[in-house]
Image (cartoon, rainbow, N blue to C red):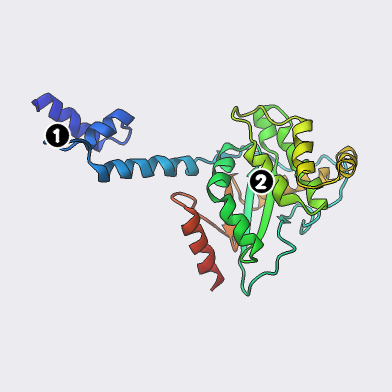
Protein backbone atom coordinates (compact mmCIF):
# COMPACT_ATOMS: atom_id res chain seq x y z
CA UNK A 1 0.00 0.00 0.00
CA UNK A 2 1.32 3.46 -0.95
CA UNK A 3 1.87 6.18 1.65
CA UNK A 4 -1.04 8.28 0.38
CA UNK A 5 -3.42 5.34 0.34
CA UNK A 6 -2.37 4.46 3.89
CA UNK A 7 -3.11 8.02 5.08
CA UNK A 8 -6.55 7.97 3.45
CA UNK A 9 -7.34 4.65 5.11
CA UNK A 10 -6.27 5.87 8.58
CA UNK A 11 -8.22 9.11 8.22
CA UNK A 12 -11.36 7.21 7.23
CA UNK A 13 -11.07 4.96 10.26
CA UNK A 14 -11.10 7.92 12.65
CA UNK A 15 -13.61 10.22 10.92
CA UNK A 16 -16.97 10.76 12.64
CA UNK A 17 -18.63 11.53 9.30
CA UNK A 18 -17.35 8.62 7.19
CA UNK A 19 -19.14 7.66 4.01
CA UNK A 20 -20.47 4.12 3.69
CA UNK A 21 -17.66 3.16 1.30
CA UNK A 22 -15.01 4.74 3.58
CA UNK A 23 -16.25 2.58 6.42
CA UNK A 24 -16.01 -0.55 4.29
CA UNK A 25 -12.51 0.41 3.15
CA UNK A 26 -11.45 1.13 6.72
CA UNK A 27 -12.66 -2.32 7.74
CA UNK A 28 -10.30 -4.04 5.30
CA UNK A 29 -7.19 -5.54 6.96
CA UNK A 30 -3.80 -4.28 5.85
CA UNK A 31 -2.83 -7.60 4.35
CA UNK A 32 -5.93 -7.94 2.20
CA UNK A 33 -8.34 -10.85 2.44
CA UNK A 34 -11.59 -8.90 2.72
CA UNK A 35 -13.18 -6.61 5.30
CA UNK A 36 -12.95 -7.14 9.04
CA UNK A 37 -16.19 -8.89 10.02
CA UNK A 38 -16.26 -7.52 13.57
CA UNK A 39 -15.93 -3.92 12.44
CA UNK A 40 -18.54 -4.41 9.72
CA UNK A 41 -20.93 -5.86 12.29
CA UNK A 42 -20.36 -2.81 14.48
CA UNK A 43 -21.09 -0.47 11.57
CA UNK A 44 -24.29 -2.39 10.78
CA UNK A 45 -25.38 -2.11 14.42
CA UNK A 46 -24.79 1.67 14.42
CA UNK A 47 -26.91 2.03 11.27
CA UNK A 48 -29.71 -0.06 12.81
CA UNK A 49 -29.65 1.99 16.02
CA UNK A 50 -29.81 5.24 14.07
CA UNK A 51 -33.07 4.14 12.47
CA UNK A 52 -34.69 3.92 15.90
CA UNK A 53 -33.07 6.93 17.55
CA UNK A 54 -34.31 9.46 15.02
CA UNK A 55 -37.13 11.23 16.81
CA UNK A 56 -39.45 13.93 15.53
CA UNK A 57 -38.79 17.11 17.47
CA UNK A 58 -41.90 18.96 18.52
CA UNK A 59 -42.01 22.68 17.87
CA UNK A 60 -43.57 25.19 20.22
CA UNK A 61 -47.19 24.10 20.33
CA UNK A 62 -48.61 26.38 22.98
CA UNK A 63 -51.83 25.56 24.77
CA UNK A 64 -54.81 24.84 22.58
CA UNK A 65 -57.95 26.67 23.59
CA UNK A 66 -60.23 25.67 20.73
CA UNK A 67 -63.46 24.50 22.34
CA UNK A 68 -65.04 23.33 19.08
CA UNK A 69 -66.28 19.77 19.00
CA UNK A 70 -67.39 17.47 21.77
CA UNK A 71 -65.79 16.93 25.15
CA UNK A 72 -66.41 13.20 25.57
CA UNK A 73 -63.54 11.04 26.79
CA UNK A 74 -62.78 7.97 24.67
CA UNK A 75 -63.05 4.67 26.51
CA UNK A 76 -59.83 4.03 28.42
CA UNK A 77 -58.90 7.70 28.81
CA UNK A 78 -57.92 8.47 32.39
CA UNK A 79 -59.05 12.12 32.32
CA UNK A 80 -59.25 15.13 30.02
CA UNK A 81 -55.73 15.47 28.63
CA UNK A 82 -54.61 12.23 30.26
CA UNK A 83 -53.39 9.10 28.54
CA UNK A 84 -55.58 6.35 27.12
CA UNK A 85 -55.10 2.90 28.67
CA UNK A 86 -55.40 0.35 25.87
CA UNK A 87 -55.35 -2.87 27.92
CA UNK A 88 -58.08 -2.17 30.45
CA UNK A 89 -59.42 -5.71 30.00
CA UNK A 90 -56.12 -7.31 31.03
CA UNK A 91 -55.50 -8.44 34.60
CA UNK A 92 -52.32 -6.67 35.67
CA UNK A 93 -49.63 -8.67 37.44
CA UNK A 94 -48.44 -7.52 40.84
CA UNK A 95 -46.40 -4.31 40.56
CA UNK A 96 -46.91 -4.10 36.80
CA UNK A 97 -45.25 -0.86 35.64
CA UNK A 98 -46.99 1.84 33.61
CA UNK A 99 -45.67 2.38 30.09
CA UNK A 100 -46.59 5.79 28.66
CA UNK A 101 -46.10 6.20 24.91
CA UNK A 102 -46.25 9.69 23.38
CA UNK A 103 -46.69 9.62 19.62
CA UNK A 104 -48.22 11.15 16.52
CA UNK A 105 -49.59 8.80 13.86
CA UNK A 106 -47.73 10.70 11.11
CA UNK A 107 -44.38 10.45 12.92
CA UNK A 108 -41.91 8.31 10.89
CA UNK A 109 -39.77 7.53 13.96
CA UNK A 110 -42.91 6.37 15.80
CA UNK A 111 -43.55 4.02 12.90
CA UNK A 112 -40.00 2.66 13.20
CA UNK A 113 -40.40 2.13 16.93
CA UNK A 114 -43.72 0.39 16.32
CA UNK A 115 -42.12 -1.91 13.75
CA UNK A 116 -39.33 -2.82 16.17
CA UNK A 117 -41.17 -3.02 19.49
CA UNK A 118 -44.89 -3.09 18.69
CA UNK A 119 -45.34 -6.87 18.80
CA UNK A 120 -43.49 -7.15 22.11
CA UNK A 121 -45.49 -4.26 23.61
CA UNK A 122 -48.77 -5.91 22.55
CA UNK A 123 -47.61 -9.20 24.05
CA UNK A 124 -46.72 -7.65 27.39
CA UNK A 125 -49.93 -5.61 27.49
CA UNK A 126 -52.16 -8.63 26.83
CA UNK A 127 -50.33 -10.57 29.55
CA UNK A 128 -50.94 -7.74 32.02
CA UNK A 129 -47.21 -7.17 32.49
CA UNK A 130 -47.60 -3.45 31.74
CA UNK A 131 -50.31 -0.84 32.04
CA UNK A 132 -50.12 0.42 28.46
CA UNK A 133 -51.04 4.09 28.16
CA UNK A 134 -50.99 6.08 24.92
CA UNK A 135 -50.82 9.86 24.53
CA UNK A 136 -51.94 10.42 20.94
CA UNK A 137 -51.01 13.83 19.54
CA UNK A 138 -51.58 15.81 16.34
CA UNK A 139 -48.76 18.38 16.26
CA UNK A 140 -47.53 17.13 12.88
CA UNK A 141 -50.65 18.48 11.19
CA UNK A 142 -49.14 21.94 11.62
CA UNK A 143 -45.72 20.84 10.38
CA UNK A 144 -47.07 18.95 7.36
CA UNK A 145 -49.96 21.33 6.62
CA UNK A 146 -52.65 18.65 6.65
CA UNK A 147 -55.15 17.17 9.09
CA UNK A 148 -54.16 13.50 8.87
CA UNK A 149 -52.89 13.21 12.46
CA UNK A 150 -56.14 14.65 13.79
CA UNK A 151 -58.34 12.38 11.68
CA UNK A 152 -56.27 9.29 12.52
CA UNK A 153 -56.32 10.11 16.24
CA UNK A 154 -60.09 10.60 16.25
CA UNK A 155 -60.54 7.35 14.32
CA UNK A 156 -58.55 5.53 17.00
CA UNK A 157 -60.64 7.16 19.75
CA UNK A 158 -63.88 6.08 18.07
CA UNK A 159 -62.41 2.58 17.88
CA UNK A 160 -61.54 2.80 21.59
CA UNK A 161 -65.22 3.37 22.38
CA UNK A 162 -65.87 -0.04 20.83
CA UNK A 163 -62.97 -1.68 22.67
CA UNK A 164 -60.79 -1.77 19.54
CA UNK A 165 -58.18 0.93 20.10
CA UNK A 166 -55.12 -1.33 19.93
CA UNK A 167 -55.82 -3.12 16.63
CA UNK A 168 -56.76 0.17 14.96
CA UNK A 169 -53.69 1.91 16.41
CA UNK A 170 -51.50 -0.88 15.03
CA UNK A 171 -53.21 -0.85 11.63
CA UNK A 172 -52.76 2.91 11.22
CA UNK A 173 -49.03 2.63 11.88
CA UNK A 174 -48.66 -0.46 9.71
CA UNK A 175 -50.20 1.48 6.84
CA UNK A 176 -48.37 4.76 7.42
CA UNK A 177 -47.72 6.23 3.94
CA UNK A 178 -44.15 5.94 2.71
CA UNK A 179 -44.20 9.61 1.70
CA UNK A 180 -44.43 11.71 4.86
CA UNK A 181 -47.38 14.07 4.68
CA UNK A 182 -49.58 11.98 2.38
CA UNK A 183 -51.73 10.87 5.31
CA UNK A 184 -54.74 8.58 5.01
CA UNK A 185 -58.07 9.05 3.31
CA UNK A 186 -61.27 8.91 5.35
CA UNK A 187 -62.09 5.67 3.55
CA UNK A 188 -58.80 4.09 4.62
CA UNK A 189 -59.30 5.04 8.25
CA UNK A 190 -62.84 3.69 8.22
CA UNK A 191 -61.59 0.39 6.77
CA UNK A 192 -58.98 0.04 9.53
CA UNK A 193 -61.74 0.51 12.09
CA UNK A 194 -64.35 -1.76 10.52
CA UNK A 195 -61.73 -4.45 9.80
CA UNK A 196 -61.09 -4.45 13.56
CA UNK A 197 -64.76 -5.30 14.12
CA UNK A 198 -66.29 -1.89 14.84
CA UNK A 199 -69.80 -1.32 13.50
CA UNK A 200 -69.64 1.01 10.49
CA UNK A 201 -72.74 3.00 11.44
CA UNK A 202 -71.49 3.52 15.00
CA UNK A 203 -68.14 4.70 13.66
CA UNK A 204 -69.77 7.12 11.20
CA UNK A 205 -71.86 8.56 14.02
CA UNK A 206 -68.81 8.98 16.25
CA UNK A 207 -66.82 10.76 13.54
CA UNK A 208 -69.72 13.01 12.58
CA UNK A 209 -70.30 14.10 16.17
CA UNK A 210 -66.60 14.96 16.61
CA UNK A 211 -67.14 13.93 20.22
CA UNK A 212 -63.45 13.57 21.14
CA UNK A 213 -62.16 16.88 19.70
CA UNK A 214 -61.51 18.57 23.03
CA UNK A 215 -59.81 15.49 24.45
CA UNK A 216 -57.31 15.44 21.58
CA UNK A 217 -56.51 19.14 22.08
CA UNK A 218 -56.14 18.59 25.82
CA UNK A 219 -53.68 15.72 25.29
CA UNK A 220 -51.52 17.95 23.10
CA UNK A 221 -51.54 20.67 25.77
CA UNK A 222 -50.80 18.25 28.60
CA UNK A 223 -47.94 16.71 26.66
CA UNK A 224 -46.16 20.06 26.65
CA UNK A 225 -46.70 20.34 30.40
CA UNK A 226 -45.27 16.83 30.81
CA UNK A 227 -42.01 18.05 29.26
CA UNK A 228 -42.23 15.85 26.18
CA UNK A 229 -40.32 17.48 23.31
CA UNK A 230 -40.12 14.72 20.70
CA UNK A 231 -41.87 11.62 19.46
CA UNK A 232 -41.73 8.79 20.09
CA UNK A 233 -41.20 9.23 23.83
CA UNK A 234 -41.52 6.20 26.10
CA UNK A 235 -41.80 6.61 29.86
CA UNK A 236 -41.62 3.66 32.22
CA UNK A 237 -43.12 4.51 35.61
CA UNK A 238 -42.57 8.16 34.74
CA UNK A 239 -38.91 7.80 33.74
CA UNK A 240 -38.00 8.37 30.09
CA UNK A 241 -36.59 5.28 28.40
CA UNK A 242 -33.57 5.43 26.12
CA UNK A 243 -34.61 3.87 22.83
CA UNK A 244 -31.11 3.89 21.31
CA UNK A 245 -30.04 0.30 20.81
CA UNK A 246 -33.30 -1.08 22.18
CA UNK A 247 -34.38 -4.53 20.99
CA UNK A 248 -37.53 -6.49 21.86
CA UNK A 249 -35.49 -8.58 24.29
CA UNK A 250 -33.83 -5.65 26.07
CA UNK A 251 -37.19 -3.89 26.19
CA UNK A 252 -38.77 -6.91 27.87
CA UNK A 253 -35.86 -7.00 30.32
CA UNK A 254 -36.44 -3.34 31.23
CA UNK A 255 -40.09 -4.13 31.93
CA UNK A 256 -39.08 -7.13 34.04
CA UNK A 257 -36.62 -5.02 36.05
CA UNK A 258 -39.29 -2.34 36.65
CA UNK A 259 -41.69 -4.97 37.99
CA UNK A 260 -39.45 -6.00 40.88
Q: Secondary structure at mark 2?
A: helix
**Position in image of residue 235 (x %, y %):** 58, 57
Quadrant of res 199: top right
Q: Is residue 195 left or right of residue 105?
A: right
The tag on residue 147 is none
Query: What residue would you read off at disc 1?
Result: 32
Query: In the rendered view, does 188 fall on the left or right side of 201?
Result: left
Numbered badge on residue 170: 2
Instruction: Please name the residue shown 76% across and 48% down the image.
Output: 218
The residue under the point 44% across, 41% down is 50
SS at mark 1?
loop
- Rendered image quadrant of residue 45: top left
Residue located 64% across and 53% down the image:
226
**Coordinates of residue 255 in the picture (x, y in percent):** 54, 64
Tags 1 and 2 touching, CB below 8 Å: no
Q: Position of residue 48 (x, y in %)?
A: 42, 42
Can residue 74 be seen in this snapshot? Answer: no
Amino acid sequence: MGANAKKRREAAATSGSMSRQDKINAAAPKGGGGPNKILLATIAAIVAIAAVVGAVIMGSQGEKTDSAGGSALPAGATKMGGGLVSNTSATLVDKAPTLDIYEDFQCPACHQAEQLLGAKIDELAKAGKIKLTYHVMNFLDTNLKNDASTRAAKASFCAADAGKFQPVHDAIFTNQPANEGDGWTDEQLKKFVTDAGVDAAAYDSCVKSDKHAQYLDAVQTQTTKDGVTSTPTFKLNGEQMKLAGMTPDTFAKAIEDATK
